[in-house]
Structures are given as C-alpha cells and as structure tokens.
Image (cartoon, rainbow, N blue to C red):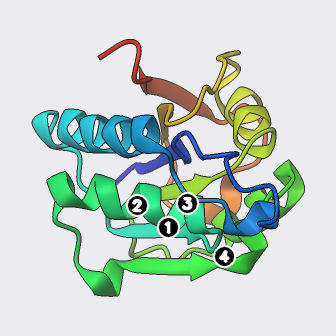
Amino acid sequence: MNKQLTLIRHAKSSWGDNSLPDYARELNKRGQNDALQIGEALHERRIKFDQVLCSSAIRARQTLSRLNEALGLDDESICYLDDLYCAPVTTLLEIIQQVDNSKHHIAIIAHNPGLEDLATRLSNERKTFSTCSVMQIEFNMQDWRGINRTTGTQRLFLSPKTI
C-alpha cells in the first residue's frame, strides 16, 4: 500500500498579547473558523489519518482540536512533538522516516517555513502555505525511510481561501 503524507500548517494565530512567547500564541477567531472549515473539507473528501503528528505549540494544538471536531480522530492516533515546533526540513524528514510502516497515511500539523519547504522538496510543487493550508502527497513506496527528495506526487492542496 502506498504512503500518504498530509502537511497542515497551523491556523491563523493572535498577536494580541505581546507578553506571550511565540510558542504560547493562541488561534484568533479567523483561525478557529478556518481550522473547522478545513476539517470539514477533509471529512467531505473522506480523508482519514492513521496517525497525526502535531507540534506542541498552542496554536498547532488548537488547530488540531478544531480540525478534529469534523474528523473525529482517535486520541491514540495523535502524538504531540516538541521537535515539530518551527522544525526545518531536515528535522521533519527525520520524524517522517521514523514513522511505523504500519501507518499508511499520516498528517503533520506544524509551522512555516519548514512545511512549505518540505512540500516543495517532496512533491516538486511550489505552493504558498498560508495559515491552515493543506497538501496531501502520495508516495509509491511502502517504507517511510525511503521518503527524501521529490519522491511524491501532490494529490490535494487546500487553503481556507480555496474551499
């Protein structure tokens, strides 16, 4: 069975409280609405994840929570990782390559510029990852360790402005 990777940038966050560290910023109202809409769009397309790897930053966690209102993910399928917070491509690839091969479709909820750079590297498709953008990439391979450079094909790209 082919592997599928869905990259999701966190939704729009608030800059209203300058005393908060970047890690602790929450979603603003638009971000909350966008994440719910994207979750509904994924649900309508019958997209299901075997595993979701989510940055432990507050805005990423809240994005997942709103997505999950439409997706109904099992708690056991969700893993929060500190290493996903503002991770560069090399770190993102290391995390993906360590995924158990029994998982065929994983999602990563994280941050730019890492996600956008990773999407370009894996699919050879240059897309702008505005907040809450989603790219699904399919790989004709059975082992996550084989994913490296331009090994996949973009199957879906969504953003709040395109749904």
Q: Is residue 8 above or below residue 103?
A: above
Instruction: State the mark number for residue 60.
Output: 3
In screen coordinates, is 68 left or right of 139? Answer: left
Question: Which residue occupies 71% across, 56% down?
Answer: 17
x, y percent for residue 107: 46, 56
Image marks 2 and 3: residues in contact by CB distance under 8 Å: yes
The disc, 2 or 4, on the residue closer to the chain's N-terminal end is 2
On the image, numbered disc 2 is attached to which residue? 64
The disc, 1 or 4, on the residue closer to the chain's N-terminal end is 1
Asked whether residue 148 is in view, the answer is yes
Q: Secondary structure at mark 2?
A: helix
In screen coordinates, is 92 left or right of 89? Answer: left
Picture quadrant of residue 72: bottom left
**88, 104: nearer the viewer:** 88
**101, 41: nearer the viewer:** 41
**122, 43: nearer the viewer:** 43
- Amino acid identity at mark 4: Gln
Question: Which residue occupies 16% across, 52% down?
Answer: 70
x, y percent for residue 133: 51, 31
Q: Secondary structure at mark 3?
A: helix
Instruction: State the mark number for residue 61.
Output: 1
The disc, 3 or 4, on the residue closer to the chain's N-terminal end is 3
Within 10 angstroms of label 4, few (less than 14), some, or many (20 or more) residues? few
User: The C terminus lies in which quarter of the figure?
Assistant: top left
Instruction: Tell which tag, 3 or 4, sits nearer the viewer.
Output: 3
Within 10 angstroms of label 3, few (less than 14), some, or many (20 or more) residues? many
